[in-house]
Amino acid sequence: SLLMWSHYGDSHKGICIGFDTSVHFFKTAMAVNYQDKYPEIKPATDSQDIGLEKTILTKASCWRYENEWRIVKHSLTEQERKARFNEYSDRCSKLDDVDTLSNHLGPGDYHFNKNSVQEIIIGAKAPMEMVTRLFEWVSNHNNSVKVFQATCHNHEYSLVINPAIQK
């Protein structure tokens, strides 16, 4: 999508990473709801989590072409962590393990298993220095990653995606 590359791929200078979505982290992804009106949040009946999800998982209909999925993380209270510790007692030895097992570490940056990367598409205007670093990463961390290069079509407003050749 030309628009997706323009909006999220640094005007074709970035990369797009394709993940194995069967990995646990990605199984928690939820589809974004596209609609014309703001979501209706009912504080009397909606839990705080439901209200938050309605807010985070709703976008204007004009963005429907993105077909976006999001991973929403909730922070657990200390009481919730202790309750989950009993639930997960057969799989965890310390309270901190609960966060990982319940997949509720809260907001922030997350590391992902390098083996979950299946493919990488290099943007049509990606700088050579970044492409070199990308191939170094692939050779050092996950040789099974398929690397592709996007180029602008010669006669159409579209992209052509071909296997990348390391230079």
Image: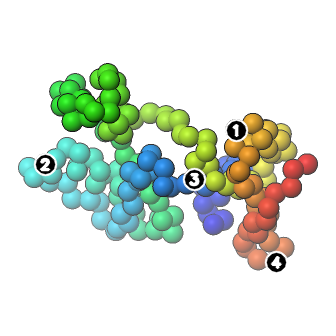
Q: Which residue is mark 3?
A: 19
Quadrant location, the N terminus: bottom right
Q: Marks 1 and 3, Cα distance to the nearest angstrom?
A: 14 Å
Mark 3 neighbour density, 10 Å: few (under 14) some (14–19) many (20 or more): some
Which of discs 1 and 4 lies nearer the camera? The answer is 1
Image x and y of residue 25, in percent: 44, 46
For image coordinates 78% across by 49% down, the residue present is: 126
Q: Which residue is mark 4?
A: 155
Under mark 1, the amino acid is His
Q: Is residue 153 visible?
A: yes
Looking at the image, tell me whether mark 1 or mark 4 is earlier in sequence order.
1
39 w.r.t. 138: above or below? below
- Answer few, some or many: residues within 10 Å of disc 2's Cα (few below 14, many 20 plus, some between 14 and 19): few
The mark lying in front, picked from 3 and 4, is 3
User: Quadrant location of residue 133?
Assistant: top right
Query: Which badge, 2 or 4, is on the more N-terminal residue?
Result: 2
The furthest residue to the bottom: 155
Horizontal arrangement in the rendering, residue 14 relative to residue 25 (left or right): right
C-alpha gap between disc 2 and disc 4? 53 Å
Identified by mark 4, the residue type is: His
**Viewer-proximal residue among 147 and 151:** 147
The x and y percentages for residue 65 are 51, 69
Decide which of 56, 28 is in the foreground and name it.
28
Residue 33, above or below 138 = below
Q: Secondary structure at mark 2?
A: loop
Q: Which residue is mark 2?
A: 43
Residue carrying label 1? 141
